[in-house]
Amino acid sequence: MQLVVLGSGTCAPTLKRSTACYYVHISGQHILLDVGFGSIRRTLEAGIDYREIDFIIITHTHLDHVGDLAPLVMALRYTPGLKRQKPLTLVGPPGFKSYLHSFSDLTAKWFFKQDGFKVNIREADRETLRFTDWDLTAMPMLHSDAANGYRIESEDRVLAYSGDTGMCDQVISLVNHADLAILECSAPDEEPLEGHLTPSLAGRIAERGDCRKVLLSHFYPMMENIDVVGKARKYFRGEIETAEDFKQYAI
């Protein structure tokens, strides 16, 4: 399993960090976890061929996590010379199908175009979806009305991704014994944001979940001058890193 961080930031733009997007490669399949605005450009900058994406897995429908979904489908349909045949599978939280159909009715009537490749939509609600050589488990997070975190398991390796969440029992279960857990870490301990984590909370979650390594991500600009790792390390004894756009990991 391979991971490339494409976006470690939030809706607040910075030159250093794009919005939420992570590329995962498993057994020849190409997956994007979230696809916030600017993600297509990020794939190109990372040397990833957006034309080969098989799965897009969405945690929730805030624009910094889903903003480039329609542009990506548009690029797959209308890039000159591209005759895509393989289907594109989209996975999201409860209500995801309704969201996509409403969006398509308003602005993108080509989204579910019948000729060319097929767009498959799956909603995941407290369940495990089984794909070729890997499983995807969805758990509800404490953020918006419908927000998932996901566990990807393949060949005895576990990648956990919280998406956006506050402190809750589910996120601890999500990262349990994960080889790598991507935990959001949006705000300082002194200025917490509702529905988000701070460094200390992320450290406590990682320790209670007993994961091997934690990748802290989803930083607002004010986090750049904070010792995020140091604050999380007070609670977590394992490996901790801060996510940086374009950094790669073997899991």
Image: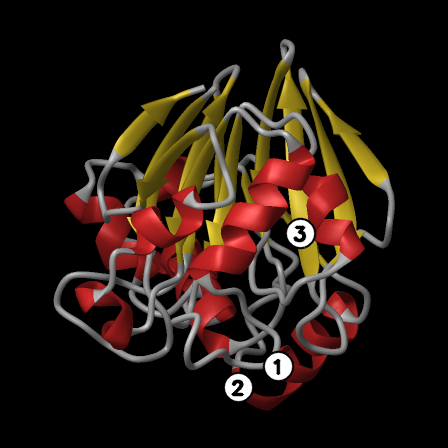
Task: For marks 1 and 3, give the CA distance.
Answer: 23 Å
Task: For marks 2 and 3, give the CA distance.
Answer: 28 Å
Name the amino acid, label 2: Thr
Name the amino acid, label 3: Gly
Residue at left offset 32%, top offset 47%: 229
Quadrant location, the C terminus: top left
Numbered disc 2: secondary structure: helix
129 w.r.t. 140: above or below: above
190 with respect to 81 (left or right): right
The residue that mark 2 highlights is 107
The numbered mark, 1 or 3, whose residue comes first in the sequence reads: 1
119 w.r.t. 111: above or below: above
Q: Are marks 2 and 1 in contact (CB under 8 Å)?
A: yes
Front residue of 221/65: it is 221
159 with respect to 140 (left or right): left
148 with respect to 225 (left or right): right
Residue 14 in the image: x percent, y percent? 18, 72
The residue that mark 3 highlights is 149
Residue 141 visible, this orientation: yes
Residue occupying the far left of the picture: 15
Task: For marks 2 and 1, give the CA distance.
Answer: 6 Å
Name the amino acid, label 1: Phe
The residue that mark 1 highlights is 103
Numbered disc 1: secondary structure: helix
